Image (spheres, rainbow, N blue to C red):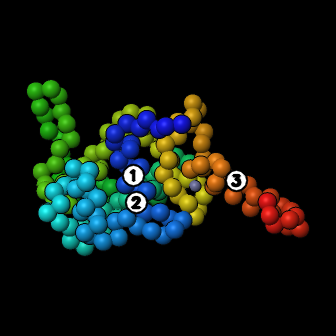
Amino acid sequence: MTEELPEAAELIKDFVNTYDVSSGTDELATSGAMSGWFAARGLMAEEAGLDEPAAAQIRAVREALRLLLLGHNDEPVPREALDTLNRAAESSRLCVEFTPEGSVLACRSTGADAALARMIAAVHSAMADESWSRLKACRRHDCRWVFYDQSRNRSKTWCAMGVCGNRTKAEKYRKRHPHAAASV
Ligand SMILES: [Zn+2]
């Protein structure tokens, strides 16, 4: 099945998945890699660059988003995750701008702050439609991959049933049946 995601939801999914929990690989491990990632998506000018404190804040926002998306899988969302997003919205100077057509979320900043503001704006816009509630982080503790749940009743729990769902089922089975063959 090909996934047709609204633009904002796709951006959030790609952003959170730049860190692969299961392998520990981080596409945004350096500030240079991070500015390249944002520049490739037109979210900031690459030459503007990022310093390490800005990169650290962006990584913190990424993990806060992962916690919020885990909340769509019935995990409690820690208050600190919301605090992290609120601080980012404030420090990136995200604001509402009124235009002849209506209003848009805009930012009065450049560089890393602009990238951060646009990411927060994407979260706000995804929250305004149903796409936000369909974005979920995989419930499996060592996966946490973000996926878009297209099921009619939004019942998906695992990133890919064939992988994490089956691994979790096999572990539960082994716990209940400790003497069963380990090759489940
Ligand atoms: Zn998974």
Instruction: State the quadrant of the C terminus.
Output: bottom right
Q: Any mark on residue 57, and which? A: none
Q: Write down the residue under mark 2.
A: 18
Q: Is residue 5 left or right of residue 47?
A: right
Cα distance in 3D space between marks 1 and 2: 6 Å
Instruction: State the quadrant of the N terminus.
Output: top right
Q: Position of residue 156 (x, y in %)?
A: 60, 42
Q: Any mark on residue 14, and which? A: 1
Cα distance in 3D space between marks 1 and 3: 24 Å
Q: Does residue 53 appear in this view?
A: no
Which one is nearer the viewer's eye here, 114 or 85?
Answer: 114
Residue, x 10% and y 27% (percent of image)? 100
The answer to whether mark 1 and mark 3 are in CB contact below 8 A is: no
Q: Secondary structure at mark 2?
A: loop
Residue furthest to the top in view is: 101
Residue, x 58% and y 64% (percent of image)? 142
Q: Position of residue 181 (x, y in %)?
A: 86, 65
Q: Position of residue 71 (x, y in %)?
A: 51, 50
Residue, x 33% and y 55% (percent of image)? 85
Q: Write down the residue under mark 3.
A: 166
Identify whether 16 is placed above or below 21. Answer: above
Residue furthest to the right in view is: 179
Which one is nearer the viewer's eye here, 37 or 83?
Answer: 37
Which comes sooner in the sequence, label 3 or label 2?
2
Q: Amino acid at mark 1?
A: Asp
Residue density around tag 2, few if under 14, some if 14–19, many if 20 or more, within 10 Å:
some
